């Protein structure tokens, strides 16, 4: 790929693929724009033109991971689900499986961003976007008090992140991580006395 002139978007994707490969092999500490340019076979100005700073590169990697996770859950939910339990299982499996597929890059990129001042909002927005997706899915079956649902789902997402990291590190099996994520989400939304609704239209 480096031997021919790529369109701008193709080049950006190539650089992101190269950056992800570096993180996978050596961790986020090894990631610099100069290193990405060298591995991709382009000049440093090309890498700087696309991302400007190392923080900009990490931000784009995080957004790519976040998009993959959201797409995995959305795709899984397109199947017809008939119960809250089935919805929760699909969400838990999609999240854990996506993180396992991405591998240790998930934790490395988020940890690197967490150590950089000014990136808190980016990470918060990512967690919030996923929490809203969860909330829309479970509210087809259970009525949550106004204002409480989003807070509950933010807690569920945080727990899912921790469990997925444990599975990625080999400290939990995939089945254990999924089962724990299911139980946490069901526990969050299935407080006695809450009404369970008939399923509404599947979210798009």
Image (tube, rainbow, N blue to C red):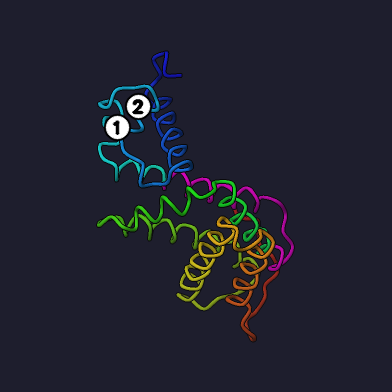
Q: Is residue 192 above or below residue 177?
A: below
Horizontal and vertical percent position of residue 14: 43, 28
Q: Which mark is residue 186?
A: none
Query: Which residue matches tag 1?
Result: 34
**In the depicted view, which residue is nearer to us: 25 or 73?**
25
Secondary structure mostly taken by the magenta-highlighted segment of the chain: helix
Stretch of the chain drawn in magenta: 62-86
- Outermost residue toward the bottom? 193
Query: Which residue matches tag 2?
Result: 38
Q: Quadrant of residue 116?
A: bottom left
Q: Residue 135, can we see it?
A: no
Q: Quadrant of residue 12?
A: top left
Q: Is residue 129 above or below residue 186?
A: above
Horizontal and vertical percent position of residue 85: 70, 68
Give the residue at x 34% y 53%: 113
Give the residue at x 59% y 59%: 167
**In the depicted view, which residue is nearer to us: 86 or 37?**
37
Give the residue at x 48% y 66%: 158
Q: Residue 114, can we see it?
A: yes
Q: Is residue 146 left or right of residue 98?
A: left
Asked if the residues shown at circle 2 and circle 1 are in contact, with their CB atoms under 8 angstroms apart, the answer is yes
Taking the magenta stretch, the answer to whether it contains residue 67 is yes
Horizontal and vertical percent position of residue 146: 48, 76
Q: Is residue 135 above or below residue 103?
A: below
Q: Is residue 25 left or right of residue 93?
A: left
Disc 2 secondary structure class? helix
């Amino acid at each position: 790929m480096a031997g021919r002139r790529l369109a701008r978007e193709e080049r950006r994707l190539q650089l992101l693929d190269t950056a992800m490969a570096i993180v996978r092999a050596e961790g986020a500490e090894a990631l610099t724009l100069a290193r990405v340019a060298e591995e991709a076979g382009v000049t440093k100005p090309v890498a700087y033109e696309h991302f400007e700073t190392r923080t900009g590169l990490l931000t784009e990697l995080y957004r790519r991971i976040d998009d993959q996770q959201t797409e995995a859950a959305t795709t899984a939910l397109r199947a017809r689900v008939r119960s809250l339990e089935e919805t929760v299982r699909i969400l838990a499996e999609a999240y854990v499986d996506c993180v396992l597929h991405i591998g240790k890059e998930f934790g490395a990129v988020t940890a690197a961003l967490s150590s950089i001042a000014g990136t808190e909002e980016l990470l918060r927005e990512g967690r919030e976007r996923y929490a809203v997706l969860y909330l829309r899915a479970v509210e087809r079956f259970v009525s949550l008090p106004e204002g409480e649902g989003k807070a509950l789902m933010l807690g569920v997402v945080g727990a899912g992140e921790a469990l997925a990291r444990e599975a990625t590190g080999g400290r939990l099996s995939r089945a254990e991580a999924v089962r724990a994520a299911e139980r946490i989400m069901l526990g969050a939304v299935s407080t006695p006395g809450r009404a369970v609704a008939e399923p509404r239209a599947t979210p798009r």
